[in-house]
Each structure stands twice: as structure tokens, then as C-alpha cells.
């Protein structure tokens, strides 16, 4: 007997629900003569069933699997005993039904564009649940995509002590952001003490805005959801709004949580008539959900954002940030502390004048000072290579770091450019 082939065409994500069209071999020509719309996702799956002789031999070895006495007499052309032909047909029909189910399951797996991300998110959720000491929460497929951006605060190595300067800002962030997340009972006496739901950090690039956000996540111990705009964009209509909704719903399930958006002006900028409809809908969904969770006094969820261009933000977004902090260019005293933090643990000479170096770094940001020190730290290696080219072999262990010598840092500053 010839082999049986089961064909299937999968469609979906074109404005309607996904489904599979299963057709039999004799209807295959009719299905091919009426093709589906080009806008639909089309997949063709075929699977071959074993031959009837192979199936008969299998069931004869497993007589308990088939009760031949229950086969209707019609299968045996009117005879009272089941014929070999009727058993063959019965087995082939059963095999065809089983293979149809396999084809259906395979097609449904192909219809899920986020299957790989969902599997990664499942592992991420297990790690989060283990760290928080709570059972694994149930999530939707869209929340699984967002779960890939959840950062374990224990893996962040930035603390407030590792950030030089910004003492007033760090004190305010500790009182307004970290303390309500760590000690909610202190703020439960009235509405005036309700925790902040939106905090914005703005300032020139390289001033430490992202480092402050990492330090907040580390100090508070809250779940840190680092929202990436690329994960919120989707080619499927309506998925962007569902992903935005998943950000807030997942934060509620994992609270206390911080939703961090870096370069927020690229996502929640001013709404213009030239904006794409999908982007406008995504912004509107974000603001409506933000207002929705701020009405919950018991929610320990906060939106933390950073930007270099606060003037580009939408006015409605700025209104929702109840606390706005400017992270500006460090002054001399702050540059002094930044130098001490950067050179902590290095081979520092005891007579280094940090105040004098800080005065020379006028207009430099924290990242600029870090780069200057990195360039100065390369001088011992350059000295070693020069000696080797001149025929003098030196032991690397005998070289002392000159990264803190005033003259070396001054030379490096001549070749360094300010961020602003």
C-alpha cells in the first residue's frame, strides 16, 4: 500500500487568529488552486506515515493495543470476523490522526515568533525567583520577553561609595527612592509620605547618570527592569502596546521593582504629527499605565529615567516625573573625590596633590577624568617597550606605576578632549 502524506498550511499574524489548514491528499490539488493571501504567513508541512505492513506487524506484536473483536462488521465487508483489510484501514486512519496532531503542534511552534526569547525568559525567571526567595510567578508570553531585561541587583558592582561627588544628589535619592523601597512601613502613615513614582536624571553625557541608576538598583535591592526600546518594537500590529503593558504588569508581580529607561527622550519624546501611529499608540499606552499604577498606594514600583536632552521630552511625561535631578559638570571638590575613587587600589604615590590635579581638570566630567587616568596608567608599559627597543631588558615586576605622577597626568590632559 502507498504511503499516506498529511499536508498542512499555517497562517496567522495578519489581522486574525493563527490557525492550521489540514488537508487530505485528495484535496491537496484544490488547496493549491486556491492560494492564501500573500500577506499571511504560509508554511507547508508534510509528514509520511509508515506503510500498512509495518503497522500491522507492530500491532500484531502488541495485541493488547488493538481489540479486533470490537471492529464493526462493516469494516470486513459484511463478515462477522474482522478481515485483514479492515484492520489495515483502521490502523492507517489512527496513524493519520496521530500524524495530523504532530503536524498541528509543529505548525503552532513555528507560528510563535518569540519562542526562543520565551525559553530564555523562563530560565531568567527561575533565577529571579531563587534570589528573591519567592515561588516562580506565572507570566504571559509578552511578560516573558520583558523578563529577559530583568537584572539581578546582586550582579551590579556599582554602589554609592564608588561614585565620586554628587553627595547631595545621592542623599536625596536615598531618602526619596531607596528608603521607600527598603522600608515601606516608614511611609505608610499618610498620603503625603507616599513613595515617588517617577524620577528623572538629566545632564551632559559622562556625568554619571547611568552609574547612579545602577547604584540605586544595588542599594535598594529591588528588581531592576532595564527597558530596551528594541524589545518594545514589533512588526506585528498591536504587539508594542502589549509589550508596554507587560512591563508594568511584570513589575507589579516582581515588586519592589524599578523600571529604568536610559535615553528616555528617544522613546518618550514630544509627540508630533509626523510620528508613526504605532509609536504614538505606544507612548499613549505607557502614560496611561503609568497613571494607572500611581493610583495604587501600596505599589512599590518606580520609573527611573535618564536623558541628555530633557527639553525633547513630552510635556505630559515631564509632569509624571515628580522628582527631577540635574547631574551637572563636577566642581573642583567633586573632581577631587572622583580622582580618589578612580585611583583607589592603584599604586598611588603618597605625595600626589589631588587638589592641584582637580584644578587642572576644569570642565572635565567623571568619565573624562577616568579616561585621563587610564591613559596615564599606560605610561609604564610604554616605558618598558622603549627600554626593550634600546636593548635594556627590565623586569615587569620592578616597574612602578606612574599613573599618579603629576607630570604624566598633565601630559595626558594635553591629548584628552572634554565631553562638552
Image (spheres, rainbow, N blue to C red):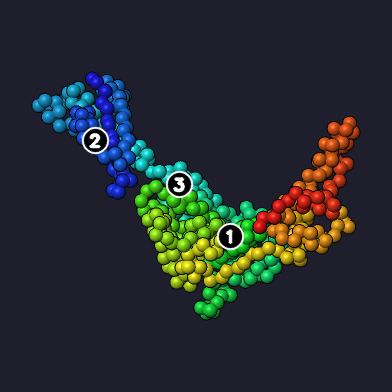
Please indicate whether residue 272 sits to the left or right of residue 224 in the image.
Answer: left
Up the image or down, 189 lies above or below 302; here it is below
Residue drawn at point x = 56 percent, y = 70 percent: 323
For label 1, the residue is 308
Which sits in the foreground, 71 or 12? 12
Q: Dot 2 surroundings within 10 Å: few (below 14), some, or many (20 or more)?
A: few
Q: Earlier in the sequence, mark 2 or mark 1?
A: 2
Which dot, 3 or 2, sits closer to the camera?
Answer: 2
41 on left or right of 363: left
Q: Which mark is residue 97?
A: none
Measuring 85% from the left and 32% from the top, which residue is drawn there? 389
Depth check: give the residue in front, 144 or 319.
319
CA gap between label 3 and label 2 equals 32 Å
- Which residue has dot 3 on it? 118
| Label disc, if present, on residue 35 of the rendered structure | 2
**In this picture, residue 385 sits left or right of residue 56:** right
Q: Comparing marks 1 and 3, which lies closer to the viewer?
A: 1
Identify the secondary structure beneath mark 3: helix
Residues marked 2 and 1 touching at CB (< 8 Å): no
With 254 as the anchor, is 83 left or right in this view?
left
Where residue 174 appears, x then y in whole percent?
63, 68
- Residue 129 in view in this figure: no
> From the image, which quarter does the C terminus lie in?
bottom right
Residue 43, given in percent of the width and then of the height, sits at 32, 35
Question: Residue 322, percent across and down?
Answer: 53, 71
Where 190 sits versus 398, above or below? below
Q: Camera-side residue: 338 or 309?
A: 309
- Which residue appears at 21% of the width and 35% of the height? 34
CA–CA distance in space, label 1 to label 3? 33 Å
x, y percent for residue 272 = 42, 60
Amino acid at each position: 500500500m502507498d504511503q499516506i502524506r498529511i499536508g498542512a498550511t499555517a497562517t496567522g499574524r495578519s489581522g486574525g487568529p493563527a490557525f492550521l489548514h489540514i488537508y487530505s491528499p485528495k484535496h491537496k490539488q484544490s488547496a493549491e488552486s486556491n492560494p492564501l493571501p500573500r500577506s499571511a504567513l504560509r508554511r507547508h508541512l508534510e509528514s509520511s506515515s509508515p506503510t500498512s505492513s509495518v503497522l500491522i506487524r507492530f500491532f500484531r506484536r502488541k495485541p493488547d493495543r488493538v481489540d479486533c473483536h470490537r471492529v464493526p462488521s462493516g469494516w470486513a465487508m459484511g463478515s462477522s470476523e474482522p478481515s485483514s483489510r479492515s484492520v489495515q484501514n483502521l490502523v492507517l486512519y489512527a496513524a493519520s490522526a496521530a500524524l495530523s496532531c504532530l503536524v498541528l503542534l509543529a505548525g503552532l511552534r513555528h507560528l510563535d515568533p518569540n519562542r526562543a526569547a520565551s525559553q530564555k525568559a523562563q530560565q531568567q525567571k527561575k533565577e529571579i525567583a531563587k534570589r528573591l526567595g519567592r515561588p516562580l510567578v506565572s507570566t504571559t508570553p509578552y511578560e516573558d520577553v520583558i523578563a529577559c531585561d530583568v537584572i539581578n541587583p546582586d550582579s551590579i558592582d556599582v554602589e554609592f561609595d564608588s561614585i565620586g561627588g554628587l553627595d547631595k544628589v545621592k542623599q536625596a535619592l536615598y531618602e526619596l527612592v531607596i528608603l521607600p523601597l527598603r522600608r515601606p512601613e516608614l511611609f505608610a502613615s499618610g498620603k503625603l509620605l507616599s513613595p515617588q513614582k517617577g524620577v528623572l536624571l538629566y545632564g551632559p553625557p559622562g556625568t554619571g547618570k547611568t552609574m547612579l541608576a545602577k547604584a540605586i538598583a544595588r542599594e535598594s535591592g529591588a528588581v531592576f527592569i532595564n527597558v530596551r526600546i528594541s524589545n518594545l518594537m514589533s512588526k506585528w500590529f498591536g504587539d508594542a502596546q502589549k509589550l508596554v503593558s507587560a512591563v508594568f504588569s511584570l513589575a507589579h508581580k516582581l515588586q519592589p521593582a524599578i523600571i529604568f529607561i536610559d535615553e528616555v527622550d528617544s522613546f518618550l519624546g514630544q509627540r508630533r504629527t509626523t510620528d508613526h501611529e504605532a509609536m504614538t499608540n505606544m507612548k499613549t499606552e505607557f502614560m496611561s499605565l503609568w497613571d494607572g499604577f500611581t493610583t495604587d498606594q501600596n505599589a512599590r514600583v518606580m520609573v527611573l529615567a535618564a536623558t541628555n536632552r530633557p527639553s525633547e521630552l513630552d510635556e505630559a511625561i515631564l509632569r509624571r516625573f515628580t522628582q527631577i535631578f540635574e547631574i551637572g559638570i563636577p566642581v573642583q571638590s567633586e573632581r577631587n573625590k572622583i580622582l580618589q575613587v578612580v585611583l583607589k587600589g592603584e599604586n598611588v604615590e603618597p605625595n600626589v596633590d589631588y587638589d592641584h590635579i582637580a584644578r587642572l581638570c576644569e570642565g572635565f566630567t567623571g568619565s573624562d577624568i577616568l579616561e585621563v587616568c587610564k591613559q596615564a596608567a599606560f605610561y609604564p608599559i610604554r616605558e618598558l617597550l622603549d627600554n626593550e627597543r634600546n636593548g635594556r631588558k627590565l623586569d615587569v615586576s620592578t616597574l612602578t606605576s606612574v599613573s599618579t605622577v603629576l607630570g604624566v597626568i598633565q601630559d595626558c590632559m594635553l591629548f584628552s578632549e572634554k565631553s562638552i
